[in-house]
């Protein structure tokens, strides 16, 4: 009977507890479904993470320049989501999946976003993108706080006098030698309040630290005798803001350029060879093209001549792949283009098999899109040889640094009029070849420049399809 009495008491206690729960649920129900849904939002759609991609072999972080899609926009394979500034250029990030852009986690103009960071969420087509669930993935970027939430927080912090506690709390921490992390935060929204510090002081029976002694001020020295002449007026303070200088932010692209050029100059055995050639025939050929309505520049003719010379001297057309040297591949000529963000080298692929008009149109298109930061990744990565032309700026001759993994770069200077042996004026142009001595022998470099000189001085041969390589005259001396 005693056991049955205990069961009856337990059942009565359980019934009273269930009654209280039903009363609580009824009270919550009278507040309306809207309030209930507001306090417990339903996150049904599972978010698909979109991570910061590595858009170049040397890219470790990048800048989200701007989003071309908005939250709720449909996404089709091949659509551009955003523009990302890498360590080399601004590249459009596209996607190969189909769905809806649900949440942008990293807003426009966010810098130094690590590769692999989750920058946005998408959901499958047809799912509710407004109720997206954040997947538990490491590297997810924190959702930026809205302006309406940020303003009250900042104002509260300003009133407190410090990030998460007020002046009285800071004074107590300094008096007792405590740090903010030593005290459990018990205030609203995780704010450290004075009572939290006093509670810890009482629990640990702490005593205030002795104040640091401050040395007394030095007594003023007696003034010397007044000078016979009046003192000069004090110099006006230099105003940094108005000195005519301005701060220029160094972009990731410029940092990478400096880093790679330093590595190239210090890690590659640079050798140099310079040649001069007569440009009269080439300039005359350009005039003929212009008279026929073909817009071809001197640089376009030089690109074609260099490409043909690389096919006739394939040992010069080489690149490093790890520790292996690769030769005999396609002739892909990189052309240095100056942009506001720094130097970039778009590639004229298969330049040896292209016509002059095709090369001219390709270079103009690449240069225009390079200055507008619209190049695709494969349009400036790769290449087997580089041309840097500063002749149009009046530079007669200069040295260029090799762009690894390539093994050669041609620095093209400006042309000038000089008298020849008979006293007739001729147009000469100097070009300096920088080559990797670990990959290219001096004889190979000399042979390449000899072929290039012959092509530039006889530009009609650039258009010839066949060529029989002749031994270089220095070969007999080896």
Image (spheres, helix red, strand yellow):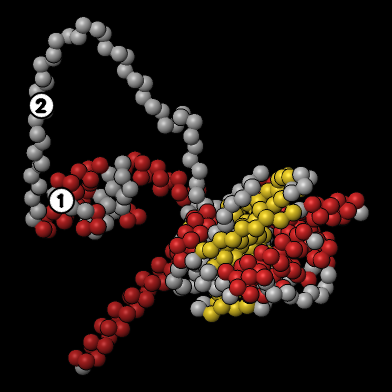
The front one of 384 and 316 is 316
The front one of 348 and 81 is 348
**x, y percent for residue 308:** 74, 69
| Residue 447, image quadrant | bottom right
Which secondary structure lies at badge 2? loop
Residue that appears at 63% across and 46% down = 395
| Mark 2 or mark 1, whichever is nearer to me | 2
Residue that appears at 8% across and 38% down = 213
User: Which residue, given by chain and number where applicable, does mark 1 sit on?
Assistant: 177
Q: Is residue 42 rendered to the left or right of residue 187?
A: right
**x, y percent for residue 461:** 81, 66
Residue 219 in view of the camera: yes
Residue that appears at 28% across and 48% down = 165
Residue that appears at 57% across and 69% down = 442
Which secondary structure lies at badge 1? loop
Q: The C terminus appears in which quarter of the rendering? A: bottom right
The front one of 44 and 29 is 44
User: Which residue, given by chain and number where applicable, does mark 2 sit on?
Assistant: 218
Q: Is tag 2's residue or tag 1's residue first in the polypeptide sequence? A: 1
For the residues marked 2 and 1, what is the alpha-carbon distance in whole angstroms? 30 Å
The front one of 278 and 179 is 278
Q: Is residue 159 above or below residue 315?
A: above
């Amino acid at each position: 009977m005693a056991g049955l009495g205990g069961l009856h008491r337990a059942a009565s206690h359980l019934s009273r507890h269930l009654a209280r729960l039903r009363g609580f649920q009824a009270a919550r129900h009278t507040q309306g479904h809207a309030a209930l849904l507001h306090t417990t939002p339903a996150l049904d759609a599972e978010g698909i993470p979109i991570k910061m991609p590595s858009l170049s072999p040397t890219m470790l972080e990048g800048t989200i320049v701007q989003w071309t899609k908005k939250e709720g926009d449909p996404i089709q394979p091949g659509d551009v989501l955003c523009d990302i500034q890498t360590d080399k250029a601004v590249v459009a990030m596209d996607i190969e999946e189909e769905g809806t852009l649900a949440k942008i986690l990293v807003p426009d103009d966010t810098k130094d976003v690590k590769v692999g960071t989750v920058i946005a969420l998408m959901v499958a087509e047809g799912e509710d993108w407004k109720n997206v669930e954040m997947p538990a993935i490491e590297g997810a970027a924190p959702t930026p706080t809205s302006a309406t939430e940020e303003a009250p927080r900042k104002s509260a912090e300003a009133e407190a006098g410090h990030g998460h506690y007020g002046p009285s709390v800071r004074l107590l921490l300094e008096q007792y030698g405590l740090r903010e992390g030593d005290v459990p935060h018990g205030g609203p929204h995780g704010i450290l309040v004075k009572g939290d510090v006093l509670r810890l002081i009482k629990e640990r029976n702490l005593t205030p630290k002795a104040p640091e002694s401050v040395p007394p001020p030095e007594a003023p020295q007696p003034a010397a005798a007044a000078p016979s002449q009046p003192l000069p007026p004090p110099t006006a303070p230099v105003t940094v803001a108005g000195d005519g200088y301005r701060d220029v932010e160094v972009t990731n692209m410029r940092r990478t350029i400096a880093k790679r050029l330093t590595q190239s100059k210090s890690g590659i055995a640079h050798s140099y060879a310079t040649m001069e050639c007569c440009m009269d025939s080439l300039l005359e050929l350009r005039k003929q093209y212009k008279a026929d309505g073909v817009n071809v520049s001197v640089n376009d003719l030089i690109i074609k001549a260099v490409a043909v010379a690389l096919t006739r001297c394939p040992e010069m057309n080489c690149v490093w792949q790890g520790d292996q040297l690769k030769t005999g591949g396609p002739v892909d000529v990189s052309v240095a283009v100056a942009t506001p963000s720094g130097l970039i080298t778009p590639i004229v692929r298969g330049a040896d098999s292209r016509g002059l008009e095709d090369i001219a149109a390709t270079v103009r298109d690449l240069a225009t899109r390079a200055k507008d930061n619209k190049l695709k990744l494969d349009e400036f990565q790769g290449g087997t040889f580089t041309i840097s032309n500063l002749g149009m700026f009046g530079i007669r001759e200069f040295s260029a640094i090799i762009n690894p993994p390539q093994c050669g770069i041609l620095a093209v200077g400006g042309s000038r009029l000089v008298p020849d042996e008979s006293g007739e004026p001729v147009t000469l142009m100097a070009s300096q070849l920088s080559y990797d001595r670990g990959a290219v022998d001096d004889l190979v470099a000399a042979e390449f420049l000899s072929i290039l000189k012959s092509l530039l001085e006889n530009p009609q041969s650039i258009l010839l399809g066949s060529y029989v390589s002749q031994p270089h005259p220095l070969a007999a001396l080896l």
